[in-house]
Amino acid sequence: MAMFRLLAILVIGLVPATVLAASIQWQRYVIPSTGTNVEIPVTIFSSDTELPDGGTGRRFYTDDRRADLTVQSVANPENYSPAAFLAKKNPPPGIIYQRVTPNFFVVSSIRNDRIWYNRCNRSAGYMNCVMINYPAAEKRQWDGVVTRISHTLAN
């Protein structure tokens, strides 16, 4: 009987993530001054309250503020490559995932039980970026959302 209850609790705990994935509404967000655009899950990031530090764009939050998404264009007047731009930012040690190409970079790690993910695409005079922070314990539920956001980032 105790095993049945445990199984029921685990299954019920998974239902909201499955329902959420099926009912996500996406909307394209555009930074007018740079043309940077990306698809945002507006049913997840429903609070748009802040300008990001160090660039133009917006910061979005979940209603409970357990996750956030920043879309921004950061001036790159020297036209640094993604590798040079990333090195200049002096990322924190312990990066778990890193991919750098001539056109973009992606870095990700875990800090304070939260996954942080950062992708920046190179464009003329800017690095156009998305930064996402979310609970590490919810990684599986976030994987598809983060992938779609990352793949739809355009200059």
Image: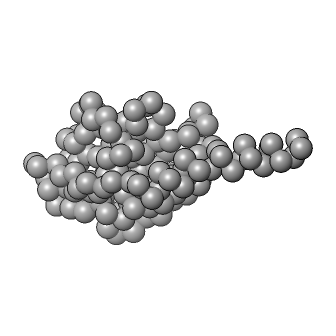
Q: Looking at the image, which residue is at 33% across and 54% down? A: 25
Residue closest to the eye, 70 or 20: 20
151 in relation to 35, above or below: below
Residue at the extreme bottom: 102
| Horizontal side of residue 27 vs 1, given as left or right | left
Name of the residue lying farthest toward the right: 1
**Quadrant in the picture for residue 37:** bottom left
* Left or right: 135 as drawn, with respect to 23: right
Q: Residue at x 45, y 58 (%)?
A: 22
Q: Nearer the viewer, residue 57 or 140?
A: 140
Please state which of residues 53 and 22 is positioned toward the viewer in this rendering. 22
Q: Residue 14, image x and y in percent?
A: 62, 50
Quarter of the image that includes the N terminus: top right
Q: Position of residue 146 (x, y in %)?
A: 44, 55
Residue at far left of view: 33
Number of marks present in the image shown: 0
Give the quarter of the figure containing the C terminus. Answer: bottom left
- Across and down, in percent, residue 151 comes to 36, 65
On the question of residue 89 being in view, the answer is no
Residue 49 visible at all: yes
Q: Tell me what residue is drawn at x 43 percent, y 31 percent.
A: 65
Q: Who's the residue at 20% across and 41% down the image?
A: 56
Residue 6 horizontal side relative to residue 48, left or right:
right
Q: Which is more toward the observer, 28 or 94?
A: 28
Residue furthest front as drawn: 1
- State whether residue 64 is above or below residue 91: above
User: Which image quarter: residue 113?
Assistant: top right
> Could you tell me residue 126's position as x and y percent?
21, 53
Q: What colouring does the structure picture have?
A: one colour
